[in-house]
Image (tube, rainbow, N blue to C red):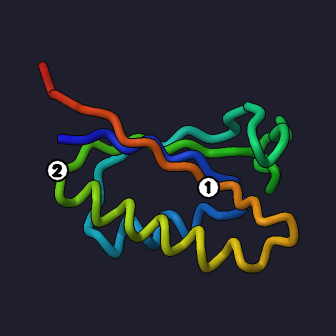
């Protein structure tokens, strides 16, 4: 199994949910108003602000993880073309995952 950690701007939540639904991912943990600082700058820390970050954690099979990564890569490439500074607030990390309980 793999754990995907997906960090994105709140304004993108519909795109992210659509991609998860497209791949039949219906089990995940979603955190809203996640603060941080990265290549796209600091996040705004106001509840439901379009500049706030969200984070989703989902445990999936390895083949599904890599299909999702391909989907997120395409989404970032497509949406990133509309960004002037070529940064797009979407980051996906993959971690080994083993359910122990």
Q: Quadrant of the C terminus?
A: top left
Left or right: where 58 falls relative to 33: left
Please provide percent x and percent y for residue 36.
74, 31
Q: Nearer the viewer, residue 71 or 58?
A: 71
Looking at the rendering, which quadrant does residue 15 occupy?
A: bottom right
Number of other residues with Cα within 10 Å of mark 1, as a class: few under 14, some 14 to 19, many 20 or more? many
Mark linked to residue 61 = 2
Q: Is residue 46 visible?
A: no
Q: Residue at x 67, y 35 (%)?
A: 34
What is the number of the mark on residue 90?
1
Q: Quadrant of the N terminus?
A: top left
Residue 25 higher or lower than 47, as above or below: below
Residue nearest the viewer, comparing 43 with 32: 43
Residue that sits furthest to the top in the current view: 101
On the rendered structure, is 90 left or right of 27? Answer: right
Q: Residue furthest front?
A: 86
Q: CA distance from mark 1 to mark 2?
A: 21 Å
Left or right, 20 with reference to 45: left
Q: Which disc number belongs to residue 30?
A: none
Residue 42 in which image quadrant? top right
Q: Residue at x 23, y 31 (%)?
A: 97
Instruction: Give the crowd class for mark 2: few <14, some 14-19, many >=20 residues within 10 Å.
Output: few
Q: Which mark is first along the chain, 2 or 1? A: 2
- Judged left or right of residue 64, residue 71 is right
- Is residue 60 among what the camera can see? yes
Helix, strand or loop status at disc 1: strand
């Amino acid at each position: 199994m793999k754990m995907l950690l997906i960090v994105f701007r709140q304004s993108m939540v519909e795109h992210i949910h659509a991609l998860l639904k497209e791949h039949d991912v219906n089990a995940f943990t979603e955190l809203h108003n996640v603060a941080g600082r990265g290549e796209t700058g600091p996040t705004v820390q106001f509840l439901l602000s379009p500049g706030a970050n969200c984070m989703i954690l989902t445990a999936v099979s390895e083949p599904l993880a890599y299909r999702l990564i391909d989907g997120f890569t395409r989404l970032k490439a497509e949406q990133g073309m509309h960004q002037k500074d070529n940064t797009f607030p979407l980051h996906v990390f993959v971690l080994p995952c083993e359910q122990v309980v």
